[in-house]
Amino acid sequence: MTTVDAPVSHLRENPFEIAREQLRRVAKVFAIDPNLVNVLQECKKAVSVSIPVAMDDGTTQVFQGHRVTHNVARGPSKGGIRYHQDVTLDEVKSLAMWMTWKCALSGIPFGGAKGGVVCNPKTMSEGELQRMTRRFTSEIINEIGPEKDIPAPDVGTDGRVMAWIFDTYSMNKGHSVLGVVTGKPLTIGGSLGREEATARGALYCVREAVRKKQISLQGASAAVQGFGNVGSFLARFLAEDGANVIAISDSTAGLHNPKGIDVQAAFAHKRETGTLAGFRGAEAITNEELLLVDCDVLAPCALEQVITTDNAAQVKAKIVVEGANGPVTPSADEILEDKGILVLPDILANAGGVVVSYFEWVQGLQEYFWKEAEVNAKLNDIITRAFNETWSTMESRGVSMRLAAYGLAVRRVAEATTTRGIYP
Ligand code: GLU
């Protein structure tokens, strides 16, 4: 018998409708020309492909894949590729749009894109994943490229997958093309600090936020949902900064200990066994319960739409830092705002990944690689500046951090579009 994928999608609302609605709200508050909104609420290009893969059991399965470019007014499009069973075209479109805003808010010269393949990578062998990745890359080979559209890791993909994309693209071109993809392993032109970058950017945001709120991270309690690339490093960084990490979770298990969890040990356990399940020194909780634990900092670092109208009123954290893209639905956002919870929005809080992707792209184009300290210092500059610009916009306009961040970002993309003019 084959394993049956999770029958219920984590997406309860249409994410692209959410993203478009957010844009329209921002446009109203920031008086963006409705003609530009007409342009910005659509994706420039969406390519859907079928990906036949020879499976280990001798069957051939056909997976669906998408690569969407939302906007290129400020530069080539940039964004990850997601491997997950719940991927839909509308989800990829919303994630592509959010990438446009994320790059604009950070001031890096990229537009937004995203890709996704409907599959469950956890049930696939390395060989199946490699064949699927190489075929997907071949199917979108005319869409991607260092001056055009540059993929990166996202949920369910990692450096290994990026290496296959890099190799497939390069083999077809006849030479190594370092700038075609970021998040590559260090051995083939990755950047120092890229793996930890998303979490590090989120940490820099939390540091600024606690400073503004006049609370200390030393001894503050934190709960982190998701123990993948973002959550696992963020939990570690928060602990290193003196925070008491009282809850962590991955897709298989949740752990809670009000006295604090040994994050290093949990990290080692996950590396060894591939799961948090079976880790001792904490009580088991569900992923839903984790969101509601009493803590100062709550970091949803897994998937979209985990804080909704169903649970937002029960969130007890003082600060919510969105390590994931879109973890709070717009109606839940209003509830959190009414409760006086400071939400550090995704396009700011998780921008560290794409910022260091930008550094990796630059290093690849120049074939000149930087020290890790240099990468982290430059990342800190960009994130801290974006945070402070967002904070002052929030104060001067009397809006939420999210609206301020989106306002700044959308305005920059709108200005670039106006400056270039609509072709022809
Ligand atoms: N997938 C990450 C994100 O959502 C990184 C994208 C990139 O580095 O291009 O921001």
Image (spheres, rainbow, N blue to C red):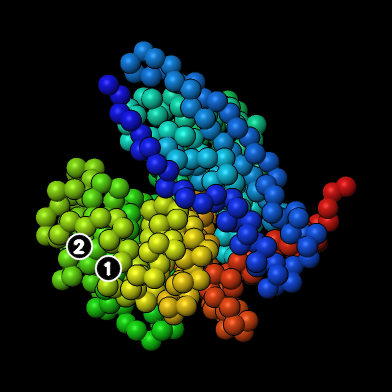
Examine the rendering and report whether any part of residue 257 can be seen: yes
At 24% across and 63% down in the image, what residue appears?
247
Contact? badges 1 and 2 (CB < 8 Å):
yes
Q: Amino acid at mark 2?
A: His
Left or right of 104 on screen, residue 280: left
User: How would you rate the neighbour count of disc 1 (Cα within 10 Å): few for under 14, some for 14-19, many for 20 or more?
Assistant: many
Of residues 117 and 211, the one nearer the viewer is 117
Q: Position of residue 389 (x, y in %)?
A: 58, 76
Of residues 353 and 339, the one nearer the viewer is 339
At 63% across and 35% down in the image, what residue appears?
47
Q: Position of residue 376 (x, y in %)?
A: 43, 64
Q: Is residue 424 above or below residue 352?
A: above
Quadrant in the picture for residue 83: top left
User: How would you rate the neighbour count of disc 2 (Cα within 10 Å): few for under 14, some for 14-19, many for 20 or more?
Assistant: many
Left or right of 254 on screen, residue 75: right
Label 1's element?
loop
Q: Quadrant of the N terminus?
A: top left
Q: Position of residue 153 (x, y in %)?
A: 46, 45
Q: Is residue 325 above or below residue 207?
A: above
Examine the rendering and report whether any part of residue 323 can be seen: no
Quadrant in the picture for residue 103: bottom right
Q: Sequence-wise, which precedes: disc 1 or disc 2?
A: 2
Residue of label 1: 293
Q: Amino acid at mark 1?
A: Val
Residue of label 2: 256
